[in-house]
Structures are given as C-alpha cells and as structure tokens.
Image (tube, grey):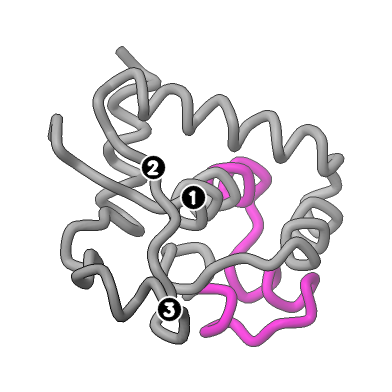
C-alpha cells in the first residue's frame, strides 16, 4: 500500500462513519438529520461524492460535535495516512480544465470499506 491514494472526501467519510457508528446512528437517520436521501449520504460517506463545506457543518451538527472537532479528527486521520505512505489527494473533477490534462485516477483511489479497513489497521497498531 505504499503507493496507495485516497481523497480528502473519502477520509472524511470514514471519520463520519466511525463517529456515526460509535453513536449507534444508522445511515438513514444520519441522512435524515442532514436533510439528504440515504443514497446521497451513502455516496458521501463512501467517498464517491465530495462533501461541500455546508455538508461538513451539517454532519457535525447531526452528530452533535463541533466543526472544529470534526476537522481535527479529519486532519489527524490524514496525517496518519500520510505517515504510512498513503497520498491524500483532491481528485480532478470531470468538468475542469485539469481533467483534460491529467489521466483519470479514479481506479487508483481507495474509498469506502477499503479505506476504513486501512485507517482502522493503522490506528490500532
């Protein structure tokens, strides 16, 4: 996994998933608290969709944690991954000028359960 990559949104999704599960909140309930459909929230949590700043605040509120706490957890997880050789990147969006210049890295990005397992294994060392 030394050459692994993941996105900031995927890391945030794992952080939220872990917080949500520790509070025994189901995805459907979390989605409802954020004013989203369950499939929309699932795409965010799995890293398939990118979070907006508004959604980050909504997620913090839905979990009754401060935005600062959520951000701190996110930064800690990013640093942990980077310390273990995992690159955390911002994927190129399809509608940007950069998308025309760079090859598609989607297949190279870790998301969802794989990232969750990776973070869990790193944090439990």
Q: Position of residue 13 (x, y in %)?
A: 52, 55
Which residue is at the front of the view, 65 or 48? 48
Question: In the visual, does 60 lie left or right of 41?
Answer: right
Image coords of residue 27 (percent x, y): 58, 68
Residues tagged 2 and 1 counted as in contact (Cβ below 8 A) = yes
Using the image, tell me which numbered label, if any, was put on residue 22: none
Looking at the rendering, in which quadrant would you find the C terminus? top left
Q: Which mark is residue 88?
A: 2
Q: Position of residue 35 (x, y in %)?
A: 79, 81
Q: Is residue 12 above or below residue 70?
A: below
Quadrant of the drawing holding the N terminus: top left
Question: Where 69 falls versus 60 (above or below)?
Answer: above
Q: Residue shown at 80%/71% (left/top)? A: 33
In the rendered structure, find residue 97 and report the number of the disc placed on it: 3
Q: Most prominent secondary structure in the magenta stretch?
A: helix
Residue corresponding to mark 1 = 8
Number of residues whose C-alpha sits closer than 10 Å to that of mark 3, classed few (under 14), some (14–19) or many (20 or more): few
Q: Is residue 51 left or right of residue 84?
A: right
Cα gap from disc 2 to disc 3, whole angstroms: 21 Å
Quarter of the view holding residue 15: top right
Does 10 appear in magenta?
Answer: no
Residue 121, picture quadrant: top left
Residue placed at 43% from the left, 75% from the top? 93
Q: The residue tagged with tag 3: helix, strand or loop?
A: helix
Give the total number of marks visible in the rendering. 3
Q: Classify residue 94 as left or right of residue 74.
A: left
Residue 31, located in which quarter of the rendered image?
A: bottom right
Q: Earlier in the sequence, mark 2 or mark 1?
A: 1
Locate residue 88, reporting x and y percent.
Answer: 39, 42
The structure residue drawn at horizontal position 26% and vertical position 46%, both measured from the top left corner, is: 5
Q: Which residues are magenta?
A: 18-42
């Amino acid at each position: 996994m030394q050459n692994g990559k993941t996105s900031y949104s995927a890391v945030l999704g794992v952080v939220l998933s872990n917080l949500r599960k520790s509070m025994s909140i189901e995805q459907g309930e979390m989605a409802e608290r954020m004013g989203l459909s369950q499939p929309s929230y699932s795409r965010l949590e799995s890293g398939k969709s990118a979070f907006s700043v508004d959604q980050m605040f909504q997620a913090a509120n839905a979990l009754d944690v401060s935005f600062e706490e959520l951000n701190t957890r996110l930064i800690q997880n990013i640093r942990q991954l980077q310390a273990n050789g995992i690159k955390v990147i911002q994927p190129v969006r399809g509608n940007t000028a950069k998308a025309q210049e760079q090859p598609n890295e989607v297949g190279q990005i870790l998301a969802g359960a794989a990232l969750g397992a990776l973070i869990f294994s790193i944090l439990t060392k």
